[in-house]
Amino acid sequence: MRRILSIAMLAAALSACGNKQDPAAPPPPPEVGVMTVQPTTVPLQEDLVGRLAPYRSADVRARVPGVLERRVYQEGSDVKEGDVLFRIDPAQLQAALGTAQGAEAQARANASNAKSAADRARRLAPTNFISKSDLDNALAAERSADAALQAARASTRSAQINLGYATVRAPISGRAGKAQVTEGALVGQGEATLLTTVDQIDPLYINFSMSAGEFERIRSMQLDRSAGGGEVEILLADGNVHDQKATLDFSGDVVDPASGALQLRAIVPNPDRSLLPGVYVTLRANMGLQSGVFLVPQAAVLRDASTAYVLVAGEGDKVVRKPVRTERAQDGQWVISEGLVAGDRVIVSGVPKARPDAVVKPVPWTPNQAQSAPAAGAGAPPAGETSGAATSEDASAAPAEEAAGQAPAANDAQD
């Protein structure tokens, strides 16, 4: 029994010693990752949406009346300038040409007779064997016959041209579209019937627009447009950049009153015909190089109701709040034009632990720091907490310890 009392007294003494606490030491300053920024030069890029359009587009129409005999080309195939696309029945046109040629032959004969009579009158005029009036009539007949011959020749030429139109050829090189009429249809009757369309798709135009305010802002900026200015990249649906770069070749000077936008256009090579007209594409236009700006990771820029700001480790590692002006997001970073100076240590990681005017412990920040931190702590419980596995082990071990501690007590009781 005395042994049990001594054990209880010893446990009470140890408990009293454990409850006695030392004065609390001040916590160490929180560790934050900082990035020392310097002014740099970056391209001014604008993300826009445009639509592809053919470089040239020509409507192929029936220019003479007749029945469409045959479609020669393969729909959707590439054709060259001058290739035969359609044939129109030439029978009536050939007959018209024959009529014109007959009229021309008659006019030529009349002109020859009139010339002979005029030459005879010219020879007789000096001998006074012909009157002045007869001479004038002979010369007038010669001129009229020549004019009639010229008109007959023009009619023949017109008939030949119309006969040539019976063979419909490609006006430009490009891709021929679907035929708009079928064989056996009557075309060109009263109007030029549309037969098909030929589009030149190498190169292609890209039509897009920009708001007038944004255009004026870019134009007022001091940009170096000699290095890559005017280049346009095409972003494909899978996120990759098209291997051919476009070049800005047109900028409108009239604002659309309905949309308040300005029309622009770029031209892009398309040698493999992978881009098709009519498709909407995402563009990244390079307007020039912008100097004297700072690149800061997006995680470092905070916002409140009034402005954007960053936290900077200033003198004595004290946190300073700096309002900034963000121009745009670019490649996962903010482009900042105002608010920072060279050498500022911007807090990138550990931002929630930093408070203005508080002292922090800055360490260099690396881009992969944010990805490596979760990986390092994967499976580990937060500080001050225990995992569920550890808790269950302690819970299972406690009864064993109690059982072990009760065994001597039971033995002493027996003694």
Image (cartoon, rainbow, N blue to C red):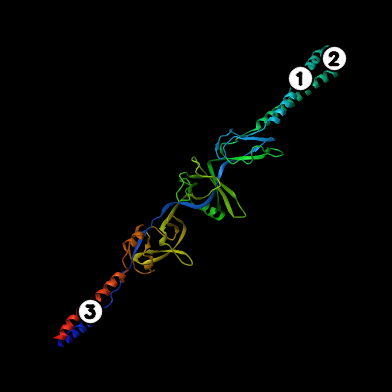
Mark linked to residue 402: 3
Q: Secondary structure at mark 1?
A: helix
Q: Are marks 3 and 2 in contact (CB under 8 Å)?
A: no
Q: Secondary structure at mark 2?
A: loop
Work out whether mark 3 precedes mark 2 in sequence or the reverse, and give the earlier one: 2
Figure quadrant of residue 353: bottom left
| Pointer 1 residue | 109
State the separation of the CA atoms marked 3 and 1: 140 Å
Foreground: 42 or 178?
A: 178
Residue 132 image point, x, y percent: 85, 18
Figure quadrant of residue 331: bottom left
Work out whether mark 2 precedes mark 1 in sequence or the reverse, and give the earlier one: 1
What residue is rendered at 76% in x and 22% in y? Answer: 106
In the displayed orientation, state which residue is furthest to the left.
415
Residue 223 image point, x, y percent: 48, 50
Residue 174 image point, x, y percent: 56, 38
Residue 113 in view: yes
